[in-house]
Image: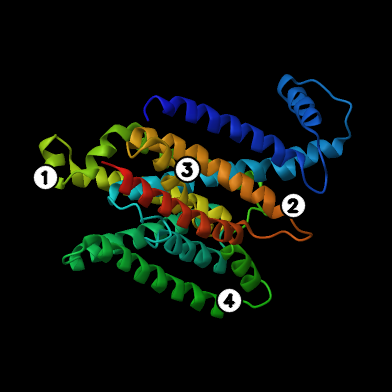
């Protein structure tokens, strides 16, 4: 699989470029790839073009932020999912199942309820996600008994349900004319209201979380060993886990804070990447990032073009993700049976 890795990365990157051109081109206001490249070239070189000014508005003010947000959030959620699955040694772990998304959502909903600015929403989302993953980690360790994986997943479900109850309480207390519609639509997961200002806040936080994970990608494989084995190889397991879980939670919270809850990406995409390049984290992470970006960009393009009204991408990721995940599980099981 090692020899296939560069080819897969290049193919996925080309796919991302193609999907980006399609996403810019289709919609109620059609823009051909030639027109798009003409405008981008004029922008880059400081030149002019003969197309109407409305083309610039659609590309740079409406579709541009949304396309970039889909790429950023898809990569962020799939990268965080790959990190959690590797760190907890469990391929069923994801930001959704661990309750991180629910915790981040509760923090963001609380900030929306208090009418706080976007930067405060990011901070509240990060704090909520960190509280959720800390609760799951410590409770799961305390009650794991004979099956630590089952205990971890059940704890994540319980914590996610608890945070979901608090979100329901916040919806009950919210103003039914202004706050409640905003919170409900936000929880469905949508990129329709993404602005350039949102990207300027979220992108640095995602990159800040991804940078240590990328630099530590070789050490991440050691977390798949037992703690004693990892310590024997010179790894400070507790410190490494603290750094990694903080980074993954920051990545998830930054994404959730601007898009709402868009599920299944953190669970589904790392599985697909693992089938393609194997479990080595140094190969798994970059492919997960690219596949996640492609997946959410394709889903969001479908969401805004397949019907007369826009469908929340969070709904589509669940509708598409469920059968796709079952298929991936079947392929994984089949490969395991065929292995010598």
What's the distance in space between the residues labelled 2 and 4, CA to CA? 32 Å
Report which quarter residue 210 is drawn in. top left
Quadrant location, the N terminus: top left
Q: Earlier in the sequence, mark 2 or mark 1?
A: 1
Label 4 with label 3: CB-CB less than 8 Å: no
Which residue is nearer to you in this view: 182 or 5?
5
The residue to which callout 2 is attached is: 305
Circle 4 residues within 10 Å: few <14, some 14–19, many ≥20: many
Residue 256 is tagged as none
Circle 1 residues within 10 Å: few <14, some 14–19, many ≥20: few
Q: Earlier in the sequence, mark 1 or mark 4?
A: 4
Label 3 with label 1: CB-CB less than 8 Å: no
Label 1 with label 4: CB-CB less than 8 Å: no
Indicate which label's residue lies in the foreground, 3 or 2. Answer: 2
Residue 323 visible in rendering: yes
Indicate which label's residue lies in the foreground, 4 or 3. Answer: 3
Report the residue at 30% width, 53% height from top: 90
Image location of residue 131, percent across then percent down: 35, 61
Above or below, comparing residue 336 to residue 10 in the picture: below
The residue to which callout 1 is attached is: 228
**Dot 4: what SS?**
loop
The residue to which callout 4 is attached is: 174
Q: Is residue 60 left or right of residue 212?
A: right
Report which quarter residue 17 is drawn in. top right
Label 2 with label 4: CB-CB less than 8 Å: no
Residue 206 is tagged as 3
């Amino acid at each position: 699989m090692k020899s296939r890795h560069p080819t897969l990365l290049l193919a996925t990157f080309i796919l991302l470029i193609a999907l980006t051109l399609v996403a810019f081109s289709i919609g109620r206001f059609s823009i051909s790839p030639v027109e798009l490249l003409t405008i981008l070239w004029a922008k880059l070189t400081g030149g002019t073009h003969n197309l109407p000014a409305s083309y610039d508005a659609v590309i740079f003010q409406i579709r541009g932020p949304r396309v970039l947000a889909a790429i950023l959030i898809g990569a962020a959620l799939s990268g965080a999912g790959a990190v959690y699955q590797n760190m907890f040694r469990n391929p069923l772990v994801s930001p959704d199942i661990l309750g991180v998304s629910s915790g981040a959502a509760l923090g963001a909903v609380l900030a929306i309820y208090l009418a706080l600015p976007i930067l405060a929403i990011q901070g509240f989302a990060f704090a909520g996600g960190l509280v959720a993953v800390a609760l799951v980690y410590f409770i799961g360790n305390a009650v794991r008994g004979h099956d630590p994986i089952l205990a971890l997943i059940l704890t994540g479900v319980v914590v996610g349900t608890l945070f979901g109850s608090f979100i329901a309480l916040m919806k009950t207390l919210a103003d039914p004319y202004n706050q409640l519609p905003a919170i409900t639509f936000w929880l469905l997961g949508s990129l329709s209201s993404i602005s350039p200002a949102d990207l300027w806040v979220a992108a640095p936080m995602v990159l800040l979380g991804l940078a240590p994970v990328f630099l530590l990608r070789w050490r991440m494989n050691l977390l798949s060993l037992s703690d004693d084995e990892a310590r024997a190889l010179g790894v400070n397991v507790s410190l490494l886990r603290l750094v990694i879980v903080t980074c993954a939670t920051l990545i998830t919270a930054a994404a959730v804070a601007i898009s709402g809850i868009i599920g299944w990406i953190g669970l589904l995409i790392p599985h697909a990447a693992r089938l393609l390049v194997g479990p080595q984290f140094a190969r798994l992470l970059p492919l997960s990032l690219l596949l996640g970006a492609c997946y959410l960009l394709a889903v969001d393009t479908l969401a805004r073009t397949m019907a007369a009204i826009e469908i929340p991408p969070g709904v589509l990721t669940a509708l598409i993700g469920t059968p796709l995940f079952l298929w991936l599980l079947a392929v994984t099981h089949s490969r395991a049976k065929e292995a010598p």
